[in-house]
Image (tube, rainbow, N blue to C red):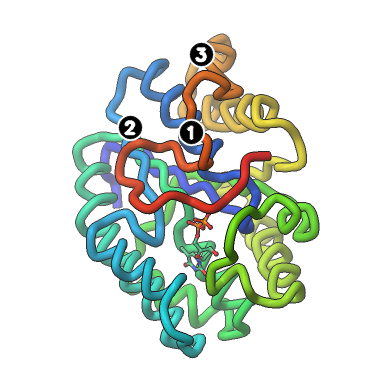
Amino acid sequence: MSAPGYFIAIEGGDGAGKSTQMARLAAWLREVTGREVVATREPGGTELGQTLRNAVMHGEHVDPRTEALLYATDRAHHVASVVRPALERGAIVISDRYLDSSIAYQGHGRELGAEEVERLSLWATDGLLPDLTVLLDLAPDAARARMTGELDRIEQADPEFFERTRDAYLERVDLDPGRYVVVSADADIASIQMETRGHVARALELDPDLIARGDADGEADGDADGDASGEAHGAPHGEAEP
Ligand code: TYD
């Protein structure tokens, strides 16, 4: 598609600090570009998505195919009702997780097969891919140590599951390096943010001097639960800040 907007996905394992980084990135982009910036998430970027999120993360046990279909349903509705309309308005859309999450978690984690899961997601979204995907990479052991509170249904998977998801993300980057940037999430919030901004600034051809503008460590914005987009995000994330 050739909508006038720009679509960024933030990906990574549970505990990588995506939500925190994403909120700061969205605030910075609003400030330095003056463009509409839509910060959203999967699953749960819509009202129906909230119901699906609750079902898949906190509901009864479901088999891997049902799980994959629930995420794909959330994505189809999210793209049709939030992401595409925003891109068509010319907005910058930043999504906390997108199709690569399904490939990593359902394709590899649940071992449904990356190609089939990718096909399912591409069908669900009518082929919409992000212009840029930022992978916040963190070793599963370090990620697990950051998780706070009660683990949801996905987070309860065994350690090998998280090894497979991490490897899957890195494999995706190797297959198509032009569409991805990898940022190590094993650093403090401000450094991760600055590196992320650098990649996004290059992709959007922004003046590099703008990277240092505004708050990068988030001390003052008070999003203690790590969920900070303040827009289409609904339920609070249980992800700890690095
Ligand atoms: P996230 O909102 O990042 O979790 P949290 O609120 O704990 O920070 O993601 C929700 C969970 O759903 C996470 O464990 C990853 C999983 N997930 C999939 O398994 N497949 C998908 O396609 C998506 C989008 C998420």
Residue 47 screen position, x and y as percent: 23, 59
Q: Amino acid at mark 3?
A: Gly
Q: Are marks 3 and 1 in contact (CB under 8 Å)?
A: no
Q: Nearer the viewer, residue 100 or 176?
A: 100
Residue 73 screen position, x and y as percent: 31, 73
Q: Earlier in the sequence, mark 3 or mark 2?
A: 2
**On the picture, is 176 further left or further right than 52?**
right
**On the picture, is 95 further left or further right than 186?**
left
Q: In the structure shown, which secondary structural element does the residue marked by tag 3 occupy?
A: loop
Which residue is identified by label 1? Answer: 223
Q: Are marks 3 and 2 in contact (CB under 8 Å)?
A: no
- Residue 126 visible in the snapshot: no
**On the picture, is 100 further left or further right than 37?**
right
Q: In the structure shown, which secondary structural element does the residue marked by tag 2 occupy?
A: strand
Who's the residue at 21% across and 43% down the image?
A: 88
The C terminus lies in quadrant = top right
Within-10-Å neighbours for mark 2: few <14, some 14–19, many 20+? many
Check residue 37 in the rendering and tell me which mark sits there, or answer none: 2
* Alpha carbon separation for disc pair 3 and 2: 16 Å
Residue 159 screen position, x and y as percent: 75, 72
* Alpha carbon separation for disc pair 3 and 1: 16 Å
Which residue is identified by label 3? Answer: 214
